[in-house]
Image (cartoon, rainbow, N blue to C red):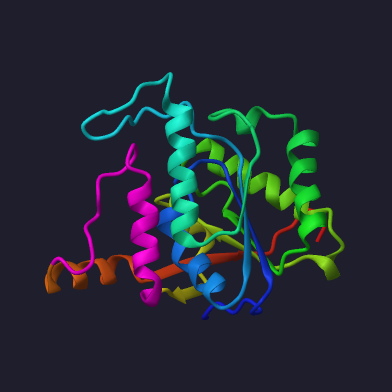
Amino acid sequence: MMMTIPANSRVLVVLPHPDDECYSLSGTLAKHIAGGGQVTYACLTLGEMGRNMGTPPFTNRVDLPRIREGELKKSVEAIGIQDLRMMGFHDKTIEFEDRQVLDGTILDLLTELKPSAVFTFYPGYSVHPDHDATGAAVVRAMGRLPESERPPLYTMAFSRNCTDEIGFPDTENDVGDFLQNKLDSIHAHRSQFPSPGELGKSKKMDRELRERFSRERFWTFREFPNA
């Protein structure tokens, strides 16, 4: 099923780390923005506990939060996101945050923005504890909304067992026309990723990049606690 989000509407993205936005949904966000939509990206942490310092290393643990913040802003600019919220939670501790505070923060965003769609990680199938804890918090917060006011929740999953246990993604988005935005978003996070390549270098590289990055797939989450 192809993704349909109302044009000129606002989307809310809730993810824990700078870089979480680039590989899996930057094309979808750029496409929505190009169609007149608004995007709010609530990034819970600055990824300050990360171990990647660039290849070759060009920073250190002391400077890493500043580096990651700068990279996040460049990525957001590449995608076109209009509203970046850096929420100030601690990296690698989302699962231990006070649920009342964490869930309440997300519920406040939902109440303020009234998004037409929400994106996060699929809890339990997103590899990193922060990813899973963030997805679970979004699910709990959305479960507190009246069902009639609850927007679609699109989730991302990466674990090896995900398709065995939750099936294949039910929603797909062709983002081939926004591949440059996506590559620029990935390139912005230079402390974390080597360059995947650039468009225009060769026909072979263009074909490889389009095959790898032109489709973004999501699971529509429906198992809300109060549903």
The stretch of residues the image draws in magenta is 176-201
Q: Where on the picture, by quarter, is residue 27?
A: bottom left
Q: Position of residue 145 (x, y in %)?
A: 84, 58
Q: Position of residue 84 (x, y in %)?
A: 60, 50
Question: Which residue lies at the image location 43% right of the left edge and 68% below the top edge?
Answer: 216
Is residue 177 toward the left or the right of residue 196 in the image? right
Say which of 65 and 193 sits in front. Answer: 65
Q: Is residue 152 above or below residue 76?
A: below
Say which of 93 and 158 sits in front. Answer: 93
Is residue 149 toward the left or the right of residue 168 in the image? right
Question: Does the segment drawn in magenta span residue 216?
Answer: no
Q: Is residue 173 visible?
A: yes
Q: Position of residue 199 (x, y in %)?
A: 23, 67
Which of the image's four quarters has the C terminus? bottom right
Question: Which residue lies at the image location 65% right of the left edge and 38% below the top edge?
Answer: 87
Is residue 149 toward the left or the right of residue 4 in the image? right
Question: Which residue lies at the image location 15% right of the left edge and 65% below the top edge?
Answer: 201
View extreme (top): residue = 62
Question: Does the segment drawn in magenta span residue 192?
Answer: yes
Q: Position of residue 202 (x, y in %)?
A: 12, 69
Say which of 178 and 104 sits in front. Answer: 178
